[in-house]
Structures are given as structure tokens and as C-alpha cells.
Image (spheres, helix red, strand yellow):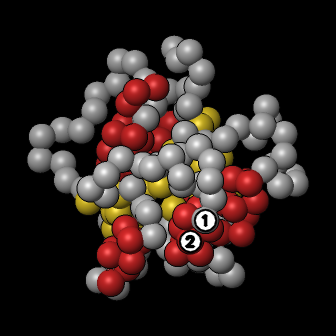
Amino acid sequence: MFPSDPTLLVIEDARVDAMLIRVAARRSVPGLDVRVAGDGREGIAYLEGLPPFQDRLSHPFPDLVILDLLMPEVDGFGVLEWLGQRKARAVPVVVLTGSPDPTHEGRAMALGATAFYRKPGDSEGLTGVVRKIVEEYLKDQTEGVSFLQPGDQTRRAGRPASTDRL
């Protein structure tokens, strides 16, 4: 199906949301390898390849990150700041948050997020948003998948993901 199955890293502390994101992503892109980090600290460890994630054959570097903002210890802003300090290959980071704070979008985008979405309040809405995200950002690696439909909207950075991210 894919020359190399793409990998999605979901950094999300809410277990139910993480499960819904995983299921929706796999249904949207068959063969997608979905990994979940339960908070920002674990997400950074995964991205950096720290134990227990140092084996990249078992824990492949992600092709896309879906990031929650409001998490204990290291929040999504901390992850974005960490990514901004790294000089390595780029990875699109899409923020998917339930935060109602209107300043969070601008702050996340300024820290290098590729796109920003607010979590819908229902599982059907969340499934639809996740479908849009994975199809949009993994489309170069997928075949035979329908992509964004007319009228779909998101906030995207005005520039492509920079190679100095991560």
C-alpha cells in the first residue's frame, strides 16, 4: 500500500481523546503507524530518541505530530519550544486542543506549529478533524486516499515547515 508506512505521533494526555485520534487516523490512512505519548515529556523523549525510544526501527521518527496544548508537566507549548531549539529534520506539528483561550492559537503558531485546530466537543467531530489533518499532512505518502473536501478550513503557518525545526 505504501512504500514505507508513515508514522503519526500523538502527544495527548487524555486517554479517550488519544484513542479516538488513533482510531480515526488509522481509518483515514490504512497502514498508518500511530504512536501515542501521554504527555509532553514523553513526546520529547520519543522525538529525541531517548530511552525507551532510542531504537528507530521499533520507534520510527514520525512524519506528523498531533499535539495537545494543555497537559501536565511539559505542556504543548513546551514541546513547541523544544522543537524550535532543535536543528534536525522537519516534522509538521498540528496542534489539536480543547483550549478555549483565544491567545493560544497565536502563541502556538508563533512557536512553529504548522496548523491549529480546536477539538470538537463530540467524537464524530473529532474523527472528522483528525481525518482532515492526517489526509492533508500525509498526502505525499499516501495513495488512493480522499483529501480535504471543499469548505474544509484550518489555520496554517504562512510558510512550509522549516528544516531548522526539531
Residue 33 quadrant: top right
Q: Is residue 137 visible?
A: yes
Q: Residue at x 35, y 25 (%)?
A: 145
> Which dot, 1 or 2, sits closer to the camera?
1
* Vertical relation: 75 (above or below) 25: below
**Quarter of the figure with residue 16:** bottom right
Q: Looking at this view, is 7 or 163 the one in front?
A: 163
Q: Residue furthest left?
A: 151
Residue type pointed to by label 2: Glu
Q: Decide if residue 14 is in sight here.
A: no
Q: Position of residue 43 (x, y in %)?
A: 67, 60
Residue named by callout 1: 85
Secondary structure beneath dot 2 equals: helix
Q: Residue at x 59, y 75 (%)?
A: 78
Q: Residues within 10 Å of mark 2 (few under 14, many from 20)?
A: some
User: Would you say 97 lies left or right of 11 here?
Assistant: left
x and y percent of residue 82 in the render? 62, 68
Q: Nearer the viewer, residue 28 or 104?
A: 104
Is 42 on the left-hand or right-hand side of 76? right
| Closest to the observer, 74 or 20 | 74
Left or right: 109 as drawn, with respect to 147 = right
- The residue that appears at 43% across and 24% down in the rendered structure is 142
Q: Which mark is residue 160?
A: none
Quadrant of image for the C terminus: bottom right
- In terms of secondary structure, where does tag 1 sit? loop
Q: CA distance from mark 1 to mark 2?
A: 7 Å
From the image, tell me which residue sits under label 2: 81
- Please say if the residues under marks 1 and 2 sit with CB atoms less than 8 Å apart: yes
What amino acid is labelled 1 in the image?
Answer: Gln
The image shows residue 159 at horizontal and vertical percentages of 31, 52
Along the horizontal axis of the image, is 114 left or right of 153?
right
